[in-house]
Image (spheres, grey):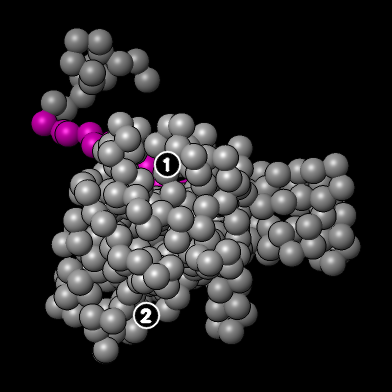
Amino acid sequence: MAINGDNGMAPGANKGIVVKKQPPVNAMDRISSEDLRDFLAVAEEGDFARAAQRLGSHPMLLKESVRELERDIGAPLIIVNPTSVTLTGAGDALVISARALLASQQASRAPRTRLPANGQLRIGVPAAPLPPLIPRILSAFRTLFPRVALNIREASDGAQLHELEAGLLDIGFVHSAHGSATLPWEALTEEALCVILPPRHPLLTLRTVALELLAAEPFILPPAGLADGFVARITQLCAEADFRPRVSHQAHQLSTAAGLVAAGLGVAIVPCDPDTDDHYGALLRPLTVHGRPASATLPLLLARGKGAPGVVLGQFVDTARRLARQPPARE
């Protein structure tokens, strides 16, 4: 049909009619249980040929199912290696949903099951420093459920627990749940801790640094009111190393703390992660306490409100659990 270039309407069309553009279809709504079944078989077998044998299908058909899923989701799900396939972060997260949805379909004998498309989650995260696992969880969940609104609130552990009690948050990432005896919570992981040292510091000659060697150093920490759980953990580790940290400066952001360290004003303790390695690798050293491997760690807990979790919250918790069990992918 020809379109009039002056007003965007066909000649003779009724100008009183307003034509609205249809909203885009949510990609997750188009996923079929058959594609999920094929993808799950490939993920579990780690090989297209073995997955095809298990399903009584052909490898090329399974490859097409996976490609269809990747088109619908808008992200790669697998990496094909010479002898096997491995999952991307989005693929790992989809495995959780695929298992749950296929089990639900089998139980109800429904011909098709859809992933939750809409909803909202109010999520609390530590104000400083942000553990590297949290962005991975948020990214994977956002890829799977692009129409679920994620409202992120930076807050201390104490503030998050209070807001969970009051129903103002649905879920929160905290370092300690001691402030509440009634909220359900679970341990996700223990983040390794590193120290950022000033340039030309004598301890840079070591591959790892025992925390007790920092007893005489001035510390740069975030304010306790902003990061109560993090500061309490650092204080606890220093006590295990038989000293009390002498705080010379407070910094809200990692970049500020790193800048103060570079100026020779103290040392800063941060969660170890690939991004921190890339920026401060020459000045960064893993920490131990009295030489014990994996002794300087920061707990990361997942706390939620008292009510029964809904479908969207349940999927978020499953995604967090899955990613907490796997190491981050390196580029």
Taking the magenta stretch, the answer to whether it contains residue 279 is no
**33 and 209: which is toward the camera:** 209
Looking at the rendered structure, the secondary structure element under dot 1 is loop
Which residue occupies 39% across, 70% down?
242
Which residue occupies 37% across, 58% down?
215
The residue lying furthest to the left in this view is: 16
Amino acid under label 1? Leu
Q: Which residue is mark 2?
A: 185
Looking at the rendered structure, the secondary structure element under dot 2 is strand
The residue lying furthest to the bottom in this view is: 182
- Does the image show residue 123? no
- Magenta-tinted stretch: 16-27
Q: Which residue is mark 1?
A: 197
Neighbour tally class for label 2: few under 14, some 14-19, many 20 plus, Cα within 10 Å: many
* Location of residue 174 in the rendering, given as x and y in whole percent from the top left corner: 32, 68
Amino acid under label 2? Trp
